[in-house]
Image (cartoon, helix red, strand yellow):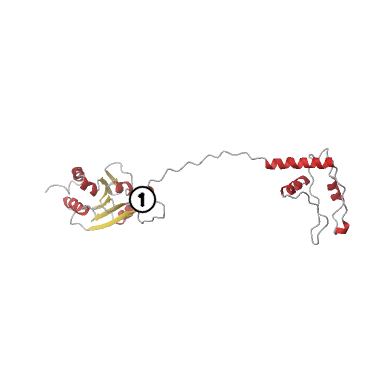
Amino acid sequence: MNELQRAEYLSVLGVPSYVPRFVLPLAPDPRQAELPPAEEAAGTQQLPVASGIAQNPLPHSADQIITQPVQSPERNARVLDEISALTDQTKRPQETVAVTPAPVAPPQQSVKPFVLNCWRIGEELLAVDSHEPGAALPLEALFNNILRALHWHQLPRQQERLQWPLTENRFGPAEDASQTRDTFSSWLEASYSRMPVKSIWLMGSEAQDFCTPIPLESQVVEWQKARLISMPSLSQLLRAPELKRPLWNLLRTSYPTETRAE
């Protein structure tokens, strides 16, 4: 650094002046601070102190101290003005850069708790029925009647019950619809891959929204080697009996052999 920068650093540190008077034991040999470039110092007289330091090296004891001549008041005022100008440049406020705020993510869509009753009927059917927790309705009896109408009531049966959320965590964040969809669509694909069936019934809005592996563009959709059929839930059929006739017409269209009158 040059002499002006050294004086500025001392000013920032709160040291008005620092001049070593002699070399301490085991200390490195002193060296003259770098002077300002020639173009900056053109037309100005070299500082007496700097020239004195350059010509008279530091003594190695207090007895060898030589008092340097005092600078003139005019020279001191000019040096202080230059230091003040440098200090003002460092304290000048920086230009603020406009920051574009990042787009805010849309709020997560919360999902109310629900239950999925799942029945596997031989190699014919995988039915997924959704309903509210704690609903005291004869869902099993109505489902058995539907199977009897299709002549599937004597086929082997497996039953499974799923619920959402999977675990109750009052201290964690609420899981949103995307997590629900990933969970149950993955479950349905794994269940079908393990034991394929000819038809998959998605009964109720939760089953249709979260369990389907593909978009449901119509009431009957082909997926792999199975048919995905959307229909009302058992709870809706019990609360609104007028929905049973459209359901029966759908079953007759989808299963003409099974629903044929004997």
User: Could one spot residue 4 in this view of the protein?
Assistant: yes
Q: Is residue 1 visible?
A: no
User: Image check: 124 left or right of 209?
Assistant: left
Q: Residue 116, position in %: x, y?
A: 29, 53
Task: Name the kind of residue labelled 1 in the image.
Answer: Thr
Relative to 39, is 160 on the left or the right? left
- Label 1: few (<14), some or many (≥20) within 10 Å? many
Q: How many marks?
A: 1
The image position of residue 43, as x and y in percent, is 83, 37
State the image quarter where residue 47 is shown. Answer: top right
Q: Residue at x 25, y 57 (%)?
A: 159
Q: What residue is pinned by disc 1?
A: 180
Q: Residue furthest left?
A: 262
Residue closer to the observer: 230 or 258:
230
Counting from the top left corner in percent of width and height, residue 153 is at 18, 55
Secondary structure of the residue carrying tag 1 is helix
Q: Residue furthest bottom?
A: 26
How far from the left and from the top, in percent, is residue 243? 21, 43
The answer to whether 229 appears left or right of 258 in the picture is: right
